[in-house]
Amino acid sequence: MLFRSHWKSRYKTISGAADCWWRPWLVLLWWSCLTQSTCGSGALEESKHLVIQREGEFDVTYNDTVTSENQTIYAFNHTVSWNKTEGVRVSVDVLSQNLKSPILFVVRQKQAVLSFQVPLILRGLYQRKYPYNHLGRTLCQPPTKSASETQYFFVDVSTLSNQGTNYQLRVSRVESFTLQTDKTFSFTASPSQPQYFKYVFPEGVDTVIVKVSSDMNFPCSVMSIQDIQCPVYDLDNNVAFIGMYQTMTKKGAITVQRKDFPSNSFYVVVVVKTEDEACGGPLRFYPLRPDELIDAGNRSKILDVVVSPAIKSEVYVMGMLFCLGIFLSFYLLTLLVACLHNKRAKKRELFENLADTSPAETASLLGKNGDGKTPASPNEYGSLNSTVSSEAVTDGAPSLDSAASADNYGYLERPLENVGRSRQESLSSIEEDDYDTLDDINSDKNIVRTKKYLCVSDLSRKDKRVLSKKYQIYFWNIATIAVFYALPVIQLVITYQTVVNVTGNQDICYYNFMCAHPLGALSAFNNILSNLGYVMLGLLFLLIVLKRDIVHNRALSCQDINALECGIPKHFGLFYAMGTALMMEGLLSACYHVCPNYTNFQFDTSFMYMIAGLCMLKLYQKRHPDINASAYTAYACLAAVIFFSVLGVVFGRGNTVFWIIFSVIHILATLLLSTQLYYMGRWRLDSGVLRRMVYIVYTDCIRQCSGPMYIDRMVLLVMGNIVNWSLAAYGLIERPNDFASYLLAIAICNLLLYFAFYIIMKLRSGERIQCLALVCILFTAVVWGFALYFFFQGLSTWQKTPAESREHNRDCILLSFFDDHDIWHFLSSIAMFGSFLVLLTMDDDLDTVQRDKIYVF
């Protein structure tokens, strides 16, 4: 009677093939329990557990009750075809409150099983629990090769609760389950109601960009790209299991390549997280009881998704050709300027030779040039060549080379002709200390360097060969540093990129995802390619310096009086170091952009500190060749700067103790350096330094009011201290998150201040700036202005969470391949190259001026 009453209930049975599988087994179980005494009480209990099966219909809401004594099975069927995908979504809502046992829903499909409980408990940080009574899940769609196929799936509803629990069930079709190219689709998602959609690659499209956007910052969400397979991981606690994924607030973008998906299609999954901490949001709840359930409130989010074709291979080729073309043009321009300068130099040399020859020799030269007379004999040519001035020799170089001849050398305290040949050839036996340790030399330095008005001849007294060796160490040291620094960096970034590709976690790297073009294993090839300018222009600068070095050495071997006794003493070691640093900046910046994040940001800035430091040393060396810092001291100081940069990135964020210590060290270092520069190194840091300071203050400020002895130096150092103390106060008060950029700003401000002081003092001393140097200065200033504009666009920032960083992402602006940061790379490399040329050519006007007439400042 129980079985008959069950079949006469209000529930309808399924006809046909759908019900044949369970009816014989149920009849057999019922008959065996009635006829066999061995069933006992266990069989009676099992007979009380009712299995109710219903034929389900789409878009119908079922209101029902489930207990531990009954289980309901809803059977659905729908037709699928290979050329059309239709999504199916199951929505469940539990109406009962204070449930002791959840309801279990199991969806059985042809190739997958999906199960979930209601209330759904999602965990957050510190094991906080958030219950959700309303769920919506999209069913995975198994692929089919048939033109049309009917597929069945069943929804089983059960619970272990003795109390009746009311629920609502609704199964509906998702009409817009397949995304269309370049068509925006809007939808709503929540932690318990994730959404995913299918996209199929069109013919001829190999790469697409999936962009998800929202007007709401929070709740935090996750977008994921997964292969067409079951199950689909679409909950907060499992969305990171497979595929590529990234957190997002307002923007998210992932570039997808056809080669990564053999089925030529993929799912776009969007999940709203239970908490906002991953996106930089606050943690609202701090429960004291670990088992307490927290109401998460309304965490629904409206989002838009659009899939657009990415750039084609032709755009990659155009981008690479454009990048190469820009920087190769500088090689061509340099060659053109060099040829023009050589032509002018030859004409000037000819006129100077004519001015120094007799009338008969002049007539012979004119005959040689086409007036019909007999050309001069070879001996006469030899006499002419021996009269060539040093200016003619040095000016025979290309335009940029003539600038180099103004750069550095001489020191004719000990003429080369007075030194034995064996002495000249054994430079390794010459040490700076050989000429700088005797007591009378120290006495002489105290007299010379403390004069009120110094000339370059006063500070270029050491043997040129000694100083050349000293400054060449700059180049060899930075080359050694570059090798030992670059090798582990390259290894590390390759590991980073491998981790990103294997795990699919795109929160590891802070790209501009709106304009990140992959190539092979590289996720943002355009950001790497744009660093080519640093390498190519650094190499070009090294070639220019090498040419100038050769021309200068040729002039020295010819005993050119201008090269020996005139102009700024020339030492090219620092220039070689600067060119090498520029090339390394390009290499390390490219390594950083393989996977940019806060742990490897020092790769991008380390050689920027090097470049700023070397430029300041070069400016100081121009007028102070004898007392400039050694390579070991300079690189030790730069190593200390990089050390503080790393500490600031790791510990500096909001750490008051760190900022106090750093500000104190910054101010003390500024004072020590100011003292060193003001007294030209003629002071001692010992136990009596305080006594001497008090004595100077008493004699110069109290006993008699006398101004500083070195006015110009005092002005520079006062301004430098004001700037550095201000920067130290700003850092202590504001405590900026980007400590590395703050430290770089300190170096650049000091470099600009010293450079401006040098230019002003040069003009004030009656010196002039030649046309080539003036063009370089104006060109470099303009390029720096545009470069800084693009630098401050800020397309990403590792000071924030990855999701917040993506809010700054923007589309490409140049050739559909390069973004604002790439243009910063282009312009900054050109600006640095121009800055180096300014340092190289700035004192070309002094090539024929005696060193005792060139002022030190």
Image (cartoon, rainbow, N blue to C red):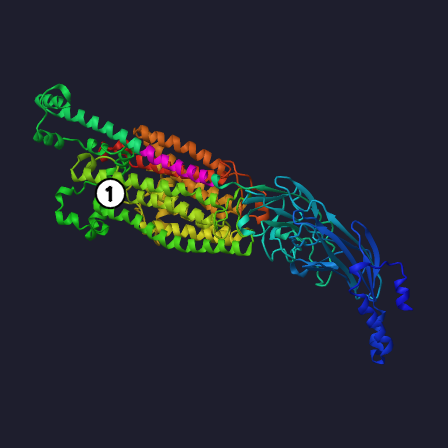
Amino acid tagged 1: Ile
Q: Position of residue 88 (x, y in %)?
A: 72, 51
Provide the major secondary structure of the magenta segment: helix
Q: Residue at x 48, y 39 (%)?
A: 315
User: Where does the N terminus fall, quadrant-wise?
Assistant: bottom right
Q: Residue at x 21, y 50 (%)?
A: 439
Image vertical order of residue 143 relative to residue 66, above or below: above
Q: Which image quadrant for residue 252?
A: top right
Image vertical order of residue 298 relative to residue 126, above or below: above
On whether residue 321 falls in the magenta region, the answer is: yes
Please, which residue is most extreme toward the bottom here? Answer: 38
Please, which residue is most extreme toward the top here? Answer: 371
Q: Position of residue 235 (x, y in %)?
A: 67, 55
Q: Which image quadrant for residue 562?
A: top left
Q: Which residues are magenta?
A: 316-334
- Residue at disc 1, secondary structure: helix
Residue underneath mark 1: 447
Q: Looking at the image, can residue 210 be seen?
A: yes
Which of 811/626 is in front?
Answer: 811
Image vertical order of residue 466 relative to residue 102, above or below: above
Which of 297/533 is in front?
Answer: 533
> For the residue carrying disc 1, how many other residues have a C-alpha within 10 Å: few (<14), some (14-19), or many (20+)?
few
Q: Residue at x 42, y 33 (%)?
A: 783
